[in-house]
Image: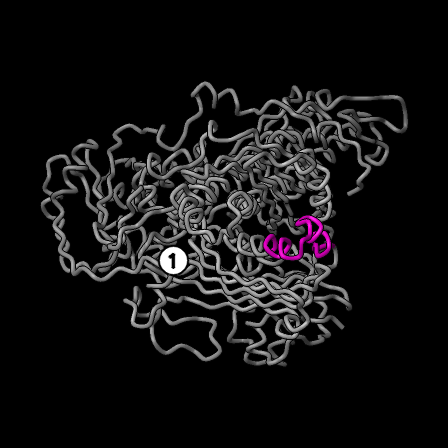
Amino acid sequence: MAIVRFSSDLARYTGTAEVEVEALNYRSLIDELINVFPDLANSEIRELALALDGELIQEPLLIEFPESAELHFVPRLAAG
Amino acid sequence: MSEARQFQHIGQRTIRPDGFDKVTGRANYGADFSLPGMVWGKILRSPYAHAKITKLDISKAEAHPGVLAVATHQDLPSVNAEAFAAGETAMDVLDLARNVLADQKVLYHGHAIAAVAAKTEAAAEAALDLIEIEYEVLTPVVTLDAAIAAGAPVLHEDMLTQGLDQPATEPSNIASRMELKKGDVEAGFKEADIIVERVYETPTVHQGYIEPHATVVRYDDKAPSLVWASTQGHFDVRAAVSKLLKMKLGQIKVIASEIGGGFGGKTTVYLEPVAMILSKKSGRPVKMVMSREEVFRASGPASASRSKVRIGAKQNGELVAMEASLHFEAGAFKGSPMGPGCMTIFTPYDVPNMYVEGFDVVLNKPKVAAYRAPGAPQAEFAAEMAMNELANKLDMDPIELRLKNAAKEGTQTIYGPKLKQVGLIECLEAAKQSPHYQSAIGDGCGRGLAAGFWFNIGGQSSVTLNLNPDGTGTIIEGSPDIGGSRASMQMMAAEVLGIEPSRLNPLVADTETLPYNQTTGGSRTTFATGMAVIEAAEDVVSQLKERAAALWNVTTEQVDYKNGVALNLAGDDQMTLAEICAAAEKTGGQISGRANVNARGAGPSFAVHLCDVKVDQETGKTDVVRYTAIQDAGKAIHPSYVEGQYQGGAVQGIGWALNEEYVYSDDGVMENAGFLDYRIPLASDLPEIETIIVEVPNAFHPFGVRGVGETGIVPPLGAVASAVSDAIDTPVTKIPCSPPHVLSMILNRD
């Protein structure tokens, strides 16, 4: 099981700060989260970057992760 | 990567390939380009900070004999609100359209309203005077307090604050609110023996790049239209022009000129779409060049900010709670770097309980743009000043306080993820052992220090590496070189290929030559484009081995490649890279490698800066007498450029801390729109900026690279201001520490 920790902004849609998921890739993660927390569909979760065990991934669409992964959705950072 | 790896070229101080052109004046910058039949474009700008346009008549300007075209917002296609990356400060396409040419309402003094293309600059200037405009002048809001006050004039009637617990129902100048939490901050403060709480303010400042914005555009309906631009990201100029004018990307070719500085300020567009409209209407190439005054009045500065910070600690210096509320000015349109400010403010510290909220506030100033580590200098200034005050109250060395609470591998950040291996502790130890910190503080001087953090990013880069029959070659990259990156690309390719860097010519290609490359910025280029260069060079090495194998009639597995030489493991044969290239015609044609990457694994960079100042107690004038910048580079590819980034960031931060600020009149007119009155530091103002490169390799990069361009501007605000505070024995809560401000603090101290 991977663990997803939500920011305060996303927690508004989930009502919880963290959840365990069975998903092992990004696409199924989003499907599972929206299935559990339907309000997340109204959030900008698909526009956020993903931190996988501390590594920031700006474009996570094709990302797969291990069972024990710790996942965070974070704002995308661009150039300065 | 292996920390024990020995490099042949990485870490050397090679001659920069673009240096000769730049010191001899042969390099072509934005304003240096011309085309046959070219005409001049000029912008008419608003004389008011906030007004409705009630009449706009361009007929007399169009009738001017020298005028070929006049453009207004009506010439822009209708676009919808849509997020668009413009540096760290993302912009909405609709807002961008309304920024490049105002639509019905002007939102800051200098806001572009109309543009003229004429045969001469003088004719264009004259025609601007013929444009008839009438305004309904509105009350401007030019401070955070004025913008968020109850009943404040609202800039955008359709702006409802995002991010509130309950959806907003009334328009407001607060575009959005953000909140980050870790642990239980109130419970943490209850554990504290001592609490420091202050409000800190930073001013609006400009990046101060040398070269004003400039462009030449030639519209073409039968071939790609040409845009020559002074930009950090020509692919994103193409994207912006495409979105604003509804042109296909393939209809636009953007060439990045050499660039006289950007620092984040050249990551969006002002002139290019307007010049495209004028070129289309006039049928002529159009050149537009901003004056310095226009740069100040109408291009994006860095946000002014106000940050309320509260830090709680135990008597032994253990931090137990950190809390902040940040307000960032966005300028006329939403999108300040408030988000990165919230994410970075407390990241140097491993503290169980944190809370940060941020507000993005619009007001009647130019829309802000990115400026080195956008949002971090303002936010971390507040935290670092409070940390130094806390150290004073605890009677603790400020480095020891930081070491006791320093973020390290495994620290859970307030924005979520745990840090990977980082080098803050190494930077603090290097600072503690530095000759600067070991030295005595001079008579009448003060000493300050501050830490700083920036994430760094990766992103998309594409590279082609072509080899010639004589073994020389070209590295074709898409990242405008704003900090010596061409030399770094040479060195990284040379390291993989085992040849001298000077045998490879780095070339920044136009948007037709390579796939999309993200803008140069965010400290991504040496990391991400470097990764693409390494991958392209490795592609070349694979081909060199295949070609050698073919020539020797052995399998590829029987060929090794080291130091620029292929070795036949089945015999004694050897061939140099040049010899393999010379025979390429016989083995399948010429050799080139390529890589298209979306680089992951950018390693965050921490820094610690030390500053000694001397304050004239009678005038308030502050001189920096010694300064040391210490930062983790992961691995310094070219140490001279790394040091240059540290020094450049330090100097810009010193300017921010000591003198730089936009001074506005009550009616929203900037009163110091030129370098005579907007005081950036000169070389003669400063001592040598000493540097210490710390190298804690980034495990995600083949050579261990971390970006180095951003973090260096984060600590100076706190380091300088805390040194001033030490020198005058008064807490500094607001920068710049300009002579009038410092004198006022001296005269009013208890």
Confirm whether the magenta stretch covers residue B542.
Answer: no
Image quarter where the N terminus of chain A lies is: bottom right
From the viewer's perspective, tell me whether residue B218 is left or right of residue B552.
left
Residue range (magenta): B387-408
Callout 1: SS: helix
Say which of B55 and B67 sits in front.
B55
Whether residue B82 appears in this view of the structure is yes
State the image coordinates of residue A10 (x, y, percent, origin top left). 57, 73
B151 w.r.t. B687: above or below: below
State the image coordinates of residue B252 (x, y, percent, origin top left). 39, 43
Whether residue B462 appears in this view of the structure is no
State the image coordinates of residue B357 (x, y, percent, origin top left). 52, 67
Q: Quadrant of residue B528?
A: top right
Question: Which amino acid does the dot numbered 1 rest on?
Answer: Val
Say which of B557 and B391 sits in front.
B391
From the viewer's perspective, tell me whether residue B137 is left or right of residue B237.
left
Say which of B511 and B683 sits in front.
B683
Q: Residue at position x 67%, y 38% from top?
A: B437
Q: Chain of mark 1?
A: B
State the image coordinates of residue B409 (x, y, percent, origin top left). 74, 55
Q: Residue at position x 69%, y 60% from top?
A: B350
From the viewer's perspective, tell me whether residue B445 is left or right of residue B289.
right
Q: Residue at position x 68%, y 56% from top?
A: A55
The residue to which callout 1 is attached is B93
Q: Could you tell me how many numbered marks the image carries?
A: 1
Q: Main secondary structure of the magenta part?
A: helix
Confirm whether the magenta stretch covers residue B398.
Answer: yes
Q: Quadrant of residue B276?
A: top left
